[in-house]
Amino acid sequence: MPPIDRHAAHSECAGIVLAAGAGTRYGKPKALAENGAWLRSAVAALRDGGCDRVIVALGATGPDPAALGLPAGTEWRWVADWATGLSATVRASLRAAAEIGSRYVAFLPVDIPDIGADVVARVLAAARSSESGLARAVFHDTPGHPVVIENKHWEAISEVAAGDAGAGSYLDGRQDMVCVTCDGLATGTDRDFPEVGAR
């Protein structure tokens, strides 16, 4: 199976699991955390939350996803220059979404394992109903993920993304970003370090 099936039907929303990093503080790539449970959870959250295509952006684990146990039907893209920063992964993911004709992308990092389909569905609905086509989850007044972005913004994001800034340099401070309160659905807390005593 090719990394991205360009011949499949176009996508209304492509869910992107950001899983390319080395997880230096965690001690290993977070795509491998909990024997891949975080990765599978992120895929399920995006798919069950309304994304009709789900693409996993890989990097530090290498270009062969076989050992990751990706759920059936999950597509993937290996980001060769992932080590240059998150921006490389964001650009590669936007290109992949453009190749399959998506209107929206929903970005979800692999290291927020308590984000479920209900959060994704709420943010995606907000983006679809907004003029800007921009929405993100907010937890206790703190911006978080997922972030949903309509395709009219992708070129500009790719042009300004640099280093580890990802899409933030384009999105941060925008008055047309719809902030979707998701308190009570999840903590939205990313996991940078393994739990004490975890193996």
Image (cartoon, rainbow, N blue to C red):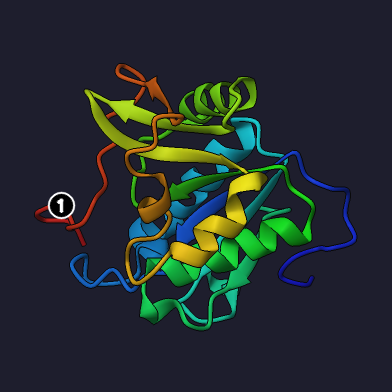
Residue at point 79% right, 52% down?
101
Q: Is residue 70 visible?
A: no
Amino acid type at mark 1: Glu
Q: Is residue 105 visible?
A: yes
The reply, left or right, for residue 48 in relation to residue 37 is right
Residue at point 42% right, 63% down?
31
Residue at point 59% right, 54% down?
154
Q: Extreme left residue here?
A: 196
Quadrant location, the N terminus: bottom right
| Along the line of sight, the residue nearer the viewer: 143 or 38 | 143
| Along the line of sight, the residue nearer the viewer: 109 or 176 | 176
Q: Is residue 17 above or below residue 45?
A: below
Q: Residue 196: x percent and y percent?
A: 9, 54
The residue beneath circle 1 is 195
Quadrant location, the C terminus: bottom left
The reply, left or right, for residue 149 in relation to residue 18 is right
The reply, left or right, for residue 143 in relation to residue 129 is left
Q: Residue 133: x percent and y percent?
A: 59, 33
Q: Quadrant of residue 165?
A: bottom left
Q: Extreme top residue here?
A: 184
Q: Is residue 19 above or below residue 179?
A: below
Q: Quadrant of residue 77?
A: bottom right
Residue at point 30% right, 19% down?
183
The secondary structure type at the circle numbered 1 is: loop
Q: Quadrant of residue 85?
A: bottom left
The reply, left or right, for residue 153 in relation to residue 135 is right
